[in-house]
Amino acid sequence: MNDNELRNLHLSSSAIILEKPPGPRSRELLQKQEHFESAAVSYPKAIPVAFAEGKGATLKDVDGNIYIDFFAGAGVVNIGHCNPEVVKAVREQMGKLTHNLDFPTPIRMELVDEILSVLPDSLRDIAKLLFVAPTGSDAVESAMKLAKFNTGRIGMISFEGAYHGMTAGAITLTANKSLKQSLMPMIPEVHFVPYAYCYRCPFGREYSNCALECAEYIEHVLEDPKSGVVDPAAIIIEAVQGEGGSLPAPDEFLIEVKRISAEYGVPLIVDEIQAGMGRTGKMWACQHSGITPDIMTISKGIGGGLPLSVLVFDEKLDTWEKGAHVGTFRGNVVAVAAGAATLRFMKKHKLWKHAARLGEDVFLPRLSEMQEEIEFIGDTRGKGLMLGVEFVKDKENKKPWSEFAKEVRKACYQRGLIVEIGGHFSNVVRFMPPLVITKELAEAGLNIFEEAVREVEKASKRAEFPAVASHSG
Ligand SMILES: Cc1ncc(COP(=O)(O)O)c(C=O)c1O
């Protein structure tokens, strides 16, 4: 898809800020929300805005401001907000059948075909599908349950920096301690091992001359009878960590993890909920390394904006009895119609290729120029349109600077660019725009980002915001 074809999908080709947000109507809705909804509401606390409309890679707030969206609803709207083909498919389905449990329908079987057609070859030939439930966390719960059921084991190996969701099992596999501290105990025997976070290698190595100590450590844990880790039911991994700070693991690392999982008979769950659906420049993030998951979790992007999640797994693991894993909204037929339209659109326009090109040619070169010039950018990285900029107080000691990242997020939003932050120390500004973003919008967004960073850099030198990093939140 070229920029001309893409252009019509968006509200405008730049951000348009009529008055500094939040405007009066946004403030009114935010106040009402704060009054009536739980304190657990999160995003509007960092980005105080009420949206009215979304198209492509742009969002309009209730006061008429237009933003460039580098967040895509946490990596959901890969095919853009209100993609016209998805809207059409959903409208049609809404008039036909809206709820259907797990009976087959023509559209459900069409989605099955669409999913099969985009799976890695090695998985397609052996794949079984299960429509789990609306959200990503549900897919993770289901994957864990399937692995436990098949192996008869209860343990799990997850990775430092991992994010797998918020339900009871998924949160246990999530590495963020602050989310779990007050909920202990979690489900038992989940162990965390280091991820290939090369910028902050826990083994103190440089990627160029390391011996993949991080992967070898997993083997050590599995083979040492006194490692303290019971034989696990599965290893769960993101091929590119999302909330961990947009961290693409080197291919060799993933290949080693796969080898170890196969050698020790531990099923490998690859969580493609955020990194999948074209985001990293291939349909699935695991395809960069060529590894075949035993179980793959899919959600976010597949529903085209509607809640849909799917488990794909090796048919050998399909040992469940009828009814072993059912639920009211699994494969909701309207979401299924949205999913089929989403995949058709992605395939027709080979959106993953567009993501790969923009990432390589537009985002990464611009970010690395900024890294050279700006003393507080410690690292820039990413694959396709899953990118991260890590802020530090000092490039030498890499001391994380969370406040800087938060100020950048705010300065971006005030200028009309939506970005989120993540990373171990909340010091990584993350970019994951809809894959339909044009080069023009991408560059306009990067201009805003650079302006914001430079403004925050100046303010930090005038000590206009807390200069001492508290490494959390
Ligand atoms: C890799 C990964 N797995 C699982 C989840 C959980 O998905 P959900 O928020 O839809 O439950 C997320 C959400 O961000 C994710 O990024």
Image (cartoon, rainbow, N blue to C red):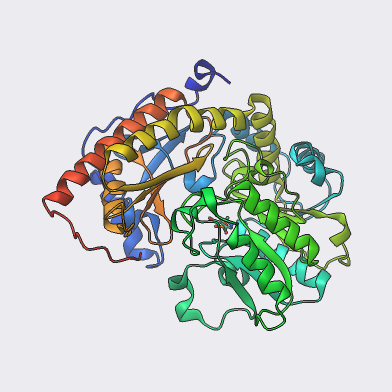
From this viewpoint, is residue 309 visible?
no
The residue depicted at 59 percent of the width and 46 percent of the height is: 306
Query: Is 308 above or below relative to 34?
Result: above
Picture coordinates of residue 250, whole percent (x, y): 59, 48
On screen, residue 107 versus residue 220, left or right, reads right
The residue depicted at 14 percent of the width and 50 percent of the height is: 461
Q: Quadrant of the N terminus?
A: top right
Picture coordinates of residue 377, whole percent (x, y): 32, 46
User: Image quarter for residue 261?
Assistant: bottom right
The residue depicted at 39 percent of the width and 25 percent of the height is: 12
From this viewpoint, is residue 199 visible?
yes
Q: Quadrant of ligand 1?
A: bottom right
Query: Is 121 above or below relative to 366?
Result: below
Q: Residue furthest left?
A: 462
Q: Residue furthest top?
A: 4
On screen, residue 75 versus residue 94, left or right, reads left
Front-lying residue, 2 or 292: 292
Q: Quadrant of the C terminus?
A: bottom left
